[in-house]
Image: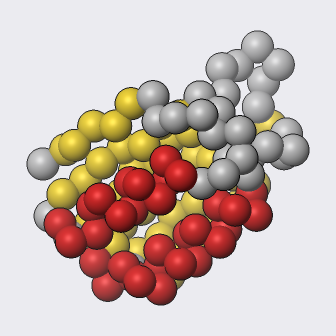
Amino acid sequence: MRSFVFRADEPFDGVKLEEFLSGMIQVYGPDLLRYKGVLWLDQNANRVVFQGVHMLMGGDMGKPWGPEEKRRQRDGVHRQETARRSVRSGFEAVPGRLAAMTQAAKLD
């Protein structure tokens, strides 16, 4: 089992992110042991908290971002090795104003 954390300093485009996550779950669902995160979506004043196990995913509106608070993506994925590159690359490529992944850490 492997894990990684995805962090970015730019918001996701909500529609494109939903398309990516739906496809990721369909293709890699059995290999995704656990995933969770706090999402920053453009045109949304609140955090979106999501989590899932295998092919079951859910999300809820979180509290609003504070006016002085630094907004940041924080998503963690625990998965079988086969899904590693595709899942991380997908997060990096989700269109929107997402510039680049600022930090990714491989956790054993």
Q: Establish if 6 lies above or below 33.
A: above
User: How far across and down, in percent of the image, does residue 66 sit?
Assistant: 78, 24
- The structure residue drawn at horizontal position 63% and vertical position 39%, both measured from the top left corner, is 98
- The structure residue drawn at horizontal position 21% and vertical position 71%, both measured from the top left corner, is 82
Residue 71 in sight: yes
89, 38: nearer the viewer? 89
Q: Along the horizontal axis of the image, is 59 left or right of 13? A: left
- The structure residue drawn at horizontal position 27% and vertical position 37%, both measured from the top left corner, is 105
User: How far across and down, in percent of the image, does residue 104 sit?
Assistant: 34, 37
Residue 78 in sight: no
96, 2: nearer the viewer? 96
Q: Specify the quadrant of the image occupied by residue 63.
A: top right
- The structure residue drawn at horizontal position 25% and vertical position 53%, both measured from the top left corner, is 3
Q: Establish if 30 lies above or below 108.
A: below
Residue at the limit of the structure toward the top, as seen here: 68
User: How far across and down, in percent of the image, does residue 55 sit?
Assistant: 45, 83
Q: Specify the quadrant of the image occupied by residue 34.
A: bottom left
Which image quarter holds the N terminus?
A: bottom left
101, 108: nearer the viewer? 101
Count of number-bearing discs = 0
Q: Along the horizontal axis of the image, is 28 left or right of 66? A: left
